[in-house]
Image (tube, grey):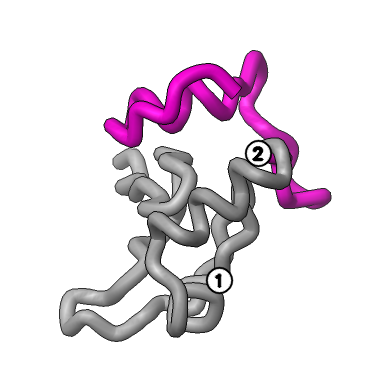
Amino acid sequence: MAKRKFTCPVCGFAALTEPHVDPMGSPSYAICPCCGIEFGNDDENRTHVQLRAEWLAKGSPWWSERQPPPSNWNASEQLNAAGFNVGPN
């Protein structure tokens, strides 16, 4: 059985292994390998929209050094596929 995947509400990465919040609404403290946001820490005082803008301002880099990006990874395509519609980057 395939593991369920979750989407990052900041960058749209659609292969998180756990959600950013649990069923009770508590943060998971998981870290997105794409944008590097730690849920429950980085988004405590900033919205996901603000964090996305900061990530975009940095040039949308892949964050994780341990987990490489998917082949042919494209930040703009990922964001648009998630419905964030940020245009080309």
Q: Are marks 1 and 2 in contact (CB under 8 Å)?
A: no
Q: Position of residue 62 (x, y in %)?
A: 71, 41
- Disc 1 marks which amino acid? Glu
Mark 2 — residue? Answer: 60
Judged from the image, the secondary structure of the residue bearing numbered disc 2 is loop
Query: At x 53% / y 18%, what residue is drawn?
Result: 88
The answer to whether 57 is drawn above or below residue 22 in the figure is above
Count residues near mark 2 (Cα–Cα under 10 Å), then give few for <14, some for 14-19, many for 20+: some
The answer to whether 57 is drawn above or below residue 85 in the figure is below
Q: Position of residue 5 (x, y in %)?
A: 35, 46
Q: Residue furthest left?
A: 24
Between the C-alphas of marks 1 and 2, the distance is: 16 Å
Query: At x 52% / y 50%, what residue is drawn?
Result: 53
Q: Nearer the viewer, residue 54 or 13?
A: 54
Type of secondary structure dominating the magenta stretch:
loop
Q: Nearer the viewer, residue 59 or 36?
A: 59
Q: Is residue 77 magenta?
A: yes
Which of the 4 image quarters holds residue 84? top left
Query: At x 51% / y 60%, what residue is drawn?
Result: 51
Mark 1 — residue? Answer: 38
Judged from the image, the secondary structure of the residue bearing numbered disc 1 is loop
In screen coordinates, is 33 left or right of 12? right
Query: At x 18% / y 75%, what residue is drawn?
Result: 23
Q: Where, quadrant-wise, is the C terminus in this rendering? A: top right
Numbered badge on residue 29 = none
Q: Position of residue 16 (x, y in %)?
A: 45, 51
- Residues drawn in magenta: 60-89
The answer to whether 17 is drawn above or below residue 22 in the figure is above
Q: Where, quadrant-wise, is the N terminus in this rendering? A: top left
Dot in front, 1 or 2:
2
In screen coordinates, is 9 left or right of 67? left
Which of the 4 image quarters holds residue 26? bottom left
